[in-house]
């Protein structure tokens, strides 16, 4: 009887873990779908300007992303650099590509919930959001220590009832304390893609915002 009980307990735990993981995966798919990920297959070219504003200082860089050919062009006040993402070799090109990935994540992070690999997903209900102070469902994305340019990073997505991100918290290296929390606001639609163009901290002193967003 003890052996049977033990086996039943182990099976129950395994099923619980699987269900929790499925719940995270299902929620991630719903978030990506809410932002129009299924329409991304029709996108051949994307242009956008990434702006980081701290107080009155703004740093900007513009991107042309040839999605079909995997070619990226970065334009700043100082330089214009074009490279092919699948043939990166030099440290200089890796540095540019790291900027592209950073800026693109801010632009279309919801799609990475179904594109990326090497992360775990967990969910929590009725968690107080850091900015609006409202109870929301939280989907946490924890990247593995071996993945990407900034391995181990974690993102807490605070979701509304329509599976849209109201706010998020970035935790560098998976730290327990938040590194940065911002809003997700000022939505636009471009060729079926839903994009948040403005992300602000609670005090408004720092923001990430986009302009010149086009999709062809």
Image (spheres, rainbow, N blue to C red):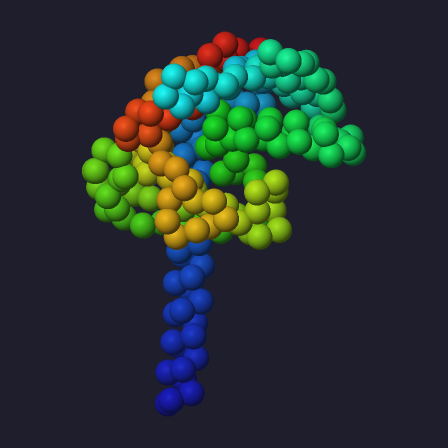
Q: Is residue 64 depicted above or below 108 in this figure?
A: above
Q: Which x, y percent locates residue 76?
A: 60, 14
Residue at point 64%, 13% (across, down): 78
Looking at the image, residue 195 sits to the left or right of residue 203; the answer is right
Q: Quadrant of the N terminus?
A: bottom left
Tally of marks: 0
Q: Which x, y percent locates residue 47?
A: 57, 13
Q: Is residue 110 depicted above or below 44 in this figure?
A: below
Residue 192 visible in this rendered orientation of the protein: no
Residue at point 57%, 52% (across, down): 145
Q: Which x, y percent locates residue 100?
A: 60, 26
Q: Quadrant of the C terminus?
A: top right
Residue 150 visible in this rendered orientation of the protein: yes
Q: Residue 28: which quarter of the image?
A: top left
The one nearer the camera, 201 or 215, is 201
Residue at point 45%, 59% (across, down): 18
Q: Residue 5: which quarter of the image?
A: bottom left
Q: Which x, y percent locates residue 212?
A: 50, 9
Q: Residue 183: which quarter of the image?
A: top left
The one nearer the camera, 184 or 41, is 184
Kindly give the residue lying farthest to the left in the view shown: 134
Residue at point 28%, 28% (across, down): 203
Looking at the image, residue 215 sits to the left or right of residue 73; the answer is left
């Amino acid at each position: 009887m003890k052996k049977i009980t033990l086996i039943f307990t182990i099976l129950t735990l395994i099923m619980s873990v699987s269900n929790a993981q499925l719940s995270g995966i299902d929620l991630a798919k719903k978030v990506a779908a809410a932002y129009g990920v299924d329409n991304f297959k029709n996108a051949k070219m994307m242009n956008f300007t990434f702006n980081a504003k701290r107080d009155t200082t703004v740093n900007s860089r513009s991107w042309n992303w040839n999605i079909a050919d995997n070619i990226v062009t970065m334009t700043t006040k100082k330089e214009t650099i074009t490279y092919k993402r699948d043939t990166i070799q030099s440290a200089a090109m890796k540095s540019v590509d790291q900027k592209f990935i950073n800026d693109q994540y801010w632009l279309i992070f919801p799609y990475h919930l179904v594109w990326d690999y090497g992360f775990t997903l967990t969910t929590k209900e009725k968690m107080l959001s850091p900015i609006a102070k409202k109870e929301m469902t939280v989907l946490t994305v924890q990247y593995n220590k071996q993945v990407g340019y900034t391995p181990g990073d974690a993102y807490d997505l605070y979701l509304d009832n329509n599976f849209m991100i109201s706010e998020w918290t970035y935790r560098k290296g998976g730290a327990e304390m938040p590194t940065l929390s911002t809003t997700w606001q000022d939505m636009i639609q471009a060729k079926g893609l839903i994009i948040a163009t403005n992300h602000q901290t609670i005090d408004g002193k720092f923001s990430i915002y986009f302009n010149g967003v086009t999709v062809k």
